[in-house]
Amino acid sequence: MKDFRYHLTSLAAVFLALAIGVVLGAGPLQANLSGALGGKVTTLQEQNDLLNRKVESLDKQNAANGNFISKLSSQVNQGSLAGRKIAVISFAGVPSAEVDKVVQTLSTSGAQIAGKAELGVGFTSPDFVQYRTSLAPRLPQYLEAKPDASASAESILAQAVMAVLQKGAEPSKSLVEILGAPENPLATFKDANGGAEAAVIITGDLSLSSGSTEGPVSGDQASAISDSVSAFAHFPKSAVALGSAASEGNVLSILREQSVAVTTIDSFPSARSLASLPPALLLAGNTPVALGSEIGAALPAPQLPKR
């Protein structure tokens, strides 16, 4: 066995080391450490303040750019849609303020708003598949153009929405009541006076079955959206879809990936996307094109039509 004095010496060394540590920590080392940390904190605060100022400056610059684009757009597009009757269709989750921006852009360009249709969550949600499937067979009797036998429930529902916007809410009273059933409203209409010959479809940032703006679109919902938009694309003159294509799960990205025959404009509701809307509507009846700067975009902006 080791001598007791060995253990006593070891314990004494440990306590001596602790004592030295406490003394140094409370004295010169503390001052050095506090000084070093204090310097780093000050530096980080200065860097943070600089970044905040840069962000503030960029926000102001972005707002100024948006203002400039809006002013220029209103002059360039003024009267370009004169005589056009255009419907505005918005998917669930699109804020009313964004719908108002589209209406204002169309009105400034001389278009007449033929009506607005707001689609409910159940229009594309996977949770309402059974409801849509059971409801769709009731609709063709109210449609002048009968759907193909292979048409999906979502395609038939979209054709019903189009019929209301083209004929008007009053002549399409049965369709309005069926689509807007209080227990499961699939579509509600406002100022639907009929005559719609073109449409703007606002997909916004639509995501999972909640119809909110969080997360990617599910596979089943993607099919429902694609079928709906494909049907909406058959307005007599043209149709344009607005929304986000910032990620692969966004609606516009899916429409582009699946080559749905409709012109799309991404980065909505930026001033740039709204500036592109009037000329896109004039050209969309020819060859659909993906406009913007996000996933799948082919051109940054539409070519201005000759006057």
Image (spheres, rainbow, N blue to C red):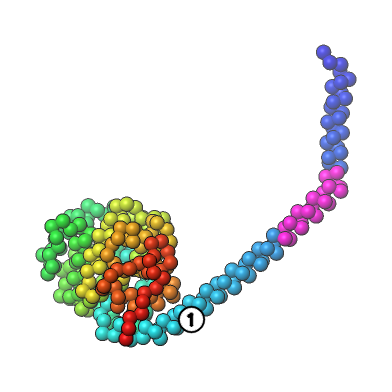
Q: State whether residue 15 is above or below residue 140.
A: above
- Looking at the rendering, the stretch of residues picked out in magenta corresponds to 24-43
Give the percent coordinates (x, y) of residue 76.
39, 84
Disc 1 marks which amino acid?
Phe
Q: State whether residue 23 is above or below residue 69.
A: above
* Residue beneath the point at 30% across and 75% down: 283
Image quadrant holding the C terminus, namely: bottom left
Give the percent coordinates (x, y) of residue 28.
86, 48
Q: Is residue 111 left or right of residue 195?
A: right
Magenta stretch: includes residue 27: yes
Q: In this view, does 182 lie to the left or right of 299?
A: left
* Residue beneath the point at 63% across and 66% down: 51
Q: Mark 1 points at which residue?
A: 68
Q: Which of 25 and 40 is in front in this view?
A: 40
Image quadrant holding the N terminus, namely: top right
Q: Nearer the viewer, residue 293 or 120?
A: 293
Give the percent coordinates (x, y) of residue 158.
22, 64
* Residue beneath the point at 88% across and 25% down: 9
Q: How crowded is mark 1: few (under 14 residues within 10 Å), some or many (20 or more)?
A: few
Q: State whether residue 248 is above or below residue 299.
A: above
Q: Is residue 192 left or right of residue 108?
A: left
* Residue beneath the point at 50% across and 77% down: 65
Magenta stretch: includes residue 307: no
